[in-house]
Image: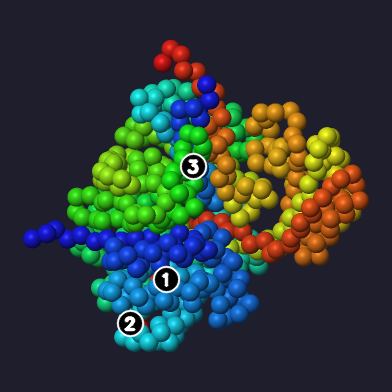
């Protein structure tokens, strides 16, 4: 008898990811499951702001476009897990259910996972915010959202209950894949080594094209084929190993180099990668190239999951203004520096509502400051003012000063300005037993 | 020689912490990387871009070094006013390190 296996692919790596590679994978017949990660750190806080403005909003904004994918994929027996809910899982499920019904799909089981919203804990208790050197009570009025990272447990429950589409809020990125893998292969969620292996696969899939040659090229040293058509990664997982690859005919590359850069991406201590599911150990992972754009990965381990869940607290910082203007040709750097001086004088007249600002010269020092300086002159430079302000008016007044640089120094051009709400997110840690998730299954 | 001639890297972010992993193109250069690309040299290279600590994790199984830089993103991806809030470009700065390939 063949040992259990499953094929699972990535459908999205962030809130604005391309849809075509997801449709290609869904229609390929190559995978039984797809995981959709729709959230980056700030996505949820921004979604929460949309929900505050309109209680029917705050979910992923691509759901209407994804309904045909879900319809076709579930027609062929496929199952999907995604954090499409963002700040409003109920609205996401409502939109999916309505869309699937309109597409003539009745009887599709859709699960909703709730419980990640920990706003009440954040505003009623005093959680430390270590990166801000403060706590939630001290800045209570500024807190707009708080969401805890939820692991695979409720995902497995939803799949056990027959869900074909599982929708949550802040489901942790790798858990979107850990849930299906453990469910299909019968791995217990407290078998830490198994969960470590599943987390490795999840980590290789969750970032989408980051595993297939995205964010990789550095010509002439690193070049991948057809980077304009990167495919999403997929994995065939068995008890012994995972084979990671991508659809034939898509661009990019899957090899030991692309795998290494993704496996150790954003995990900090390779022996202690903390997720809601496990403390994963990727230090001894083996990567073998077994074919064109195909690798075997094995050797991940794990130990007990962390006792605290990480949460991200959204903080209203007022408004952010950005203004840019370009100087080119002889003396451009000197003119940009004169513009910098003018701006500092003008910003001083706006007053206390400006809480922070910086002025950089793109092409000269905007990315690395003084840390990288290969040349002593440039052909052109773009001044960038970025400011944080208590009020929209102050932010607008500040970026107007960049526009006014049209009147000198000489030759400034191409002004672009923007003013946007400035929502920051910062981590907090909450004991796991304080957070209760709920799974509900509805049928279209 | 610049590190970029013999190694590749990727940087990522978690709030105000940057994670940069570095690998040699040829695994036999791993001992050279261990010797040359030290915490101190990374801290010096990044200068005041990084206000916290630089910690290096060695990954001999995959010939990799993983650097964790705290207080490295101007207060955090969503908080900073920097033009590259994620520090996506940090992978390129670390590859600008001068490497002494002699007496390995």
Task: Identify the residue at horizontal 38%, vertical 40% (top origin).
Answer: A257
Q: Is residue A22 visible?
A: yes
**Percent position of residue B32, x then y:** 42, 22
Assess disc 2: are there few (<14), some (14-19) or many (≥20) residues with their C-alpha within 10 Å of its C-alpha.
Answer: many
Chain of the residue on which disc 2 is drawn: A
Query: Residue A3 at what x, y percent from top left?
Result: 14, 58
Quarter of image, res A416:
bottom right
| Residue drawn at 88 percent across, 54 percent down | A404
The answer to whether mark 3 and mark 1 are in CB contact below 8 A is no
Query: Can you identify the residue that label 2 sits on?
Result: A108
Relative depth, front residue between B33 and A106: A106
Label 3 marks a residue whose chain is A
| Pointer 3 residue | A217
- In the shown orientation, is residue B73 left or right of residue B99? right
* Left or right of residue A250, residue A397 in this image: right
- Nearer mark to the viewer, of 2 and 1: 2
Mark 3 vs mark 1: in front: 3
Picture coordinates of residue A412 (x, y %)?
Answer: 84, 47
Dot 1: chain letter: A
Taking the spot 58% from the left edge, 75% from the top edge, the residue there is A51
């Amino acid at each position: 008898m063949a040992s259990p296996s499953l094929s699972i692919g990535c459908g999205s790596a962030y809130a604005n990811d391309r849809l075509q590679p997801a449709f290609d994978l869904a229609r390929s017949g190559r995978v039984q499951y797809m995981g959709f990660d729709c959230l980056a750190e700030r996505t949820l806080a921004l979604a929460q702001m949309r929900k505050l403005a309109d209680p029917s909003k705050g979910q992923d904004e691509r759901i209407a476009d994804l309904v045909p994918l879900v319809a076709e994929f579930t027609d062929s027996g496929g199952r999907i897990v995604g954090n499409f809910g963002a700040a409003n899982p109920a609205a996401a499920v409502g939109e999916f259910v309505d869309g699937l019904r309109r597409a003539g799909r009745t009887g599709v089981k859709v699960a909703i996972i709730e419980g990640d919203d920990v706003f009440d804990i954040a505003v009623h208790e005093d959680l430390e915010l270590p990166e801000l050197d403060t706590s939630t009570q001290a800045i209570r009025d500024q807190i707009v959202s708080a969401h805890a990272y939820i692991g695979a447990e409720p995902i497995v429950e939803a799949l056990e209950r027959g869900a074909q589409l599982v929708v949550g809020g802040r489901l942790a990125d790798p858990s979107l894949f850990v849930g299906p893998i453990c469910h299909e292969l019968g791995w217990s969620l407290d078998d830490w080594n198994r969960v470590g292996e599943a987390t490795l696969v999840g980590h290789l899939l969750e970032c989408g094209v980051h595993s297939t040659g995205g964010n990789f090229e550095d010509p002439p040293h690193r070049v991948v084929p057809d980077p304009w058509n990167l495919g999403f990664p997929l994995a065939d997982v068995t008890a012994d190993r995972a084979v990671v690859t991508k659809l034939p005919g898509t661009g990019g590359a899957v090899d030991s180099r692309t795998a290494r850069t993704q496996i150790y991406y954003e995990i900090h201590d390779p022996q202690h990668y903390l997720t809601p599911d496990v403390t994963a150990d990727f230090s001894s992972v083996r990567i073998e190239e077994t074919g064109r754009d195909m690798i075997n990965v094995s050797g991940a381990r794990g130990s007990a999951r962390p006792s605290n869940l990480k949460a991200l607290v959204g903080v209203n910082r007022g408004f952010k203004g950005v203004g840019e203007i370009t100087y080119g040709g002889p003396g451009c750097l000197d003119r940009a520096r004169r513009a910098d001086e003018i701006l500092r004088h003008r910003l001083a007249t706006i007053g206390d509502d400006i809480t922070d600002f910086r002025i950089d010269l793109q092409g000269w020092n905007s990315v690395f400051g003084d840390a990288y300086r290969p040349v002593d002159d440039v052909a052109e430079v773009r001044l960038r003012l970025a400011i944080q302000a208590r009020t929209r008016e102050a932010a607008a007044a500040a970026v107007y000063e960049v526009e006014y640089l049209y009147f000198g120094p000489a030759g400034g051009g191409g002004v672009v300005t923007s003013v946007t709400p400035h929502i920051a997110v910062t981590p907090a840690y909450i004991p796991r037993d304080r957070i209760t998730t709920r799974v509900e299954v509805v049928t279209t | 020689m610049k590190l970029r001639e013999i190694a590749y890297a990727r940087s990522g972010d978690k709030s105000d912490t940057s994670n940069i992993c570095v690998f040699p193109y040829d695994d036999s250069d791993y001992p050279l990387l261990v010797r040359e690309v030290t915490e101190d040299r990374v801290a010096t290279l990044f200068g005041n871009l990084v206000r916290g600590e630089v910690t290096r994790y060695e990954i001999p199984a995959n010939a990799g070094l993983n650097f964790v830089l705290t207080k490295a993103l101007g207060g955090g991806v969503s908080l900073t006013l920097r033009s590259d809030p994620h520090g996506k470009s940090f992978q390129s700065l670390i590859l600008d390190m001068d490497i002494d390939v002699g007496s390995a």
